[in-house]
Image (cartoon, grey):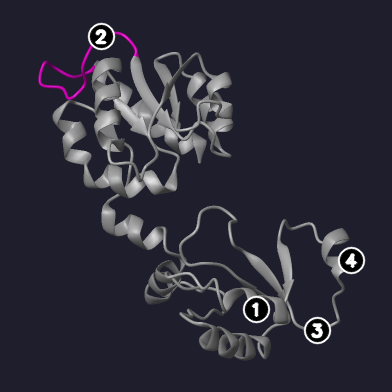
Amino acid sequence: MTKLFLLRIQLMVANKENSDLSSPFRGTGGFNVLMTGAGAPGAAGILKCLHSSPEIKVIAADADPNATGRWLNAEFEKIPFAHDENFIEQLLSICERRIIHVVLPLVTKELIPLAQNKRKFEEQETRILVSKIDSLEIANNKSRLYQFLEWRGIDVPKYRVVENIDQFELAVEELSSLQKRICFKPSVAKRKQGIFGLLQTTSMSTTSCLMQNKIQLYFIWGCNAHSFLSSHFPETGW
């Protein structure tokens, strides 16, 4: 994935070097990239990849002033969280001051706000490395993504989309007859947040879950899942 990011940015560098005065790129010399999400799990690898190209100057950014990536890059900017009212305004200001050519966002919650305001950045000659809004709304919602893949004829695991505890119990019963183990996760959540393996029989002990499984997955007994979800069912469904 980092190589794909680098390839796309390098192609934009080539366009910059071969452009005329009507080019969307400002300034002279280096090619400036603002990478948000400096504390994201993949930030270190992406920074290493970007640093391998001498044409690219990286400014790391994060809402956390102590984000890991801050200490892996020469320059850093503290930015608001994606849900803050001044998020776009502050990024526009940084891009103008730093003469940013490309914004590379690594935070899921930043993607749609940036896509919605893409034109504002382009007006001051900054590109946003982000997909279209409709694509993001599918990719960031696992229920919609599975439904989209099915529609395109792509095989996906057996699954159910549920919106309340009764639907959850019915889905568990149906899926249990098809396969031995079940996992559940909110439709909208980043990385591995909220994902659980569901234990329904004594065929797999708690000890084996903790000591013998290599996959990083939290397990929960069916009765405990019912108790938790009865009062914590997410609005986006599971």
Q: Residue furthest front?
A: 231
Q: Are marks 4 and 1 in contact (CB under 8 Å)?
A: no
Label 1 sits on residue:
227
Q: Secondary structure at mark 2?
A: loop
Gap in Å between the C-alphas at discs 4 and 2?
Answer: 61 Å
Question: Looking at the picture, how far across and down is residue 164, in whole percent?
Answer: 49, 82
Q: Residues within 10 Å of mark 1 (few under 14, many from 20)?
A: few
Residues in magenta, as a range: 18-30
Q: Secondary structure at mark 1?
A: helix
Kindly identify which numbered label has been placed on residue 28: 2
Toward which corner of the image does residue 171 lie, by quadrant? Answer: bottom right
Label 4 sits on residue:
207
Amino acid under label 1? Ser
In magenta stretch: residue 28: yes
Kindly identify which numbered label has been placed on residue 201: 3
Q: Are marks 3 and 1 in contact (CB under 8 Å)?
A: no
Amino acid under label 3? Thr
